[in-house]
Image (cartoon, grey):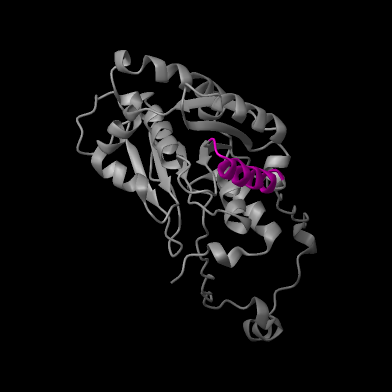
Amino acid sequence: MPVIAVVNRKGGSGKSTLATHLAAFCANAGLPVMLGDVDRQQSTQAWLKLRHTQALPSTCAPIVGWAIDPKNVLRPPAGIRHVVLDTPGGLRDFDLARVVAFADAILMPVCNSVFDRESAAECLAELKALPRIAGGRCKVAAVGMRLDARTKADEVLQAWAAKQDVPFLGVLRETQAYVRSVERGLTLFDLPASQTQVDMAQWKPILEWLEPVLYQAPVAVEEKSRPVVQPAARPAVSLASRPVAVSAPAAAASTPAMVRPSQPVSRPRPRVQPTLLEPAVAPGLGARVGRFLEALSIPRFFTRQP
């Protein structure tokens, strides 16, 4: 299950705009997608309510909302194979590691100011220290947000990304087209192509970088092979070697109590609490998160409360 997370610990960097557009791109490509809102402001959920009021083409796949509730098991709805996560500002430490445990790719929107660049650099340094990113299982890239084409802001961000040793996928210009479309529950991907030619050219390198993640082959679940135990062969006994018949009272007295017929004892099966991602819901992702939790020795954190 491909999971793309939009991460930047500084507020107002354009995370929700980027997340909603990624979800809309999947929907317009016919990929049912879940837009997970990890932010307490629930900005993307409000956008989804507006989107449900729009008349969209029948070829457009649904975008399903998913607000995180720590008291419940978090699972994608049935039929969903792609996930886009919109994360809150100030994400760090264990909360950041938890998002990385889910994600296959992380996009970091960065605005052109010294405050935005310094905050993003600190977040990138923490991300690179996490095993999934250091091992290449979750890739990270930066995107310039709301840049003025008349300035050299893109060059500044390119130099910043090179210094951080992180791929820089390009910039998204500052235009009212993003504001007007989001206010209606739409994105630029839902508008006629004649109105979005310039902006679609800016999205092309971003989508090309995400293509291996979005269209990755499903991971087959490897079942552990259990050894087949063959029943032991009974020794051949000739008729001449059979024991002499014993009377019923003597046979009863000589029969051990442990082999006497009795009523089967029903033992209650232990109750297993469902964990954050059950294997039946997301097999590959569940196993990956399970190994991550075992390493941290905190399985109770992700257990559903009664």
Instruction: Give the camera-side residue of 129 and 194.
Output: 194
* Residue at figure coordinates x 24%, y 25% from the top left: 58
- 61 vs 256, left or right, is left
- The C terminus, quarter of image: bottom left
Q: Is residue 170 above or below residue 125?
A: above
> Which residue in the rendered view is the most extreme toward the front?
151
Q: In the image, residue 117 lies at what x, y percent?
A: 60, 40
Q: In the image, residue 124 lies at what x, y percent?
A: 65, 43
Provide the major secondary structure of the magenta segment. Answer: helix
* Residue at figure coordinates x 39%, y 23% from the top left: 29
Q: In the image, residue 295 lies at what x, y percent?
A: 70, 57
* Residue at figure coordinates x 24%, y 41% from the top left: 50
Could you say which quadrant of the image residue 125 lies in? top right
Q: Quick check: is 258 in the magenta stretch?
A: no
Please report the bounds of the magenta region as a residue range. Answer: 112-128
- 257 vs 285, left or right, is right
Q: In the image, residue 201 lies at what x, y percent?
A: 45, 16
Q: Is residue 1 visible?
A: no
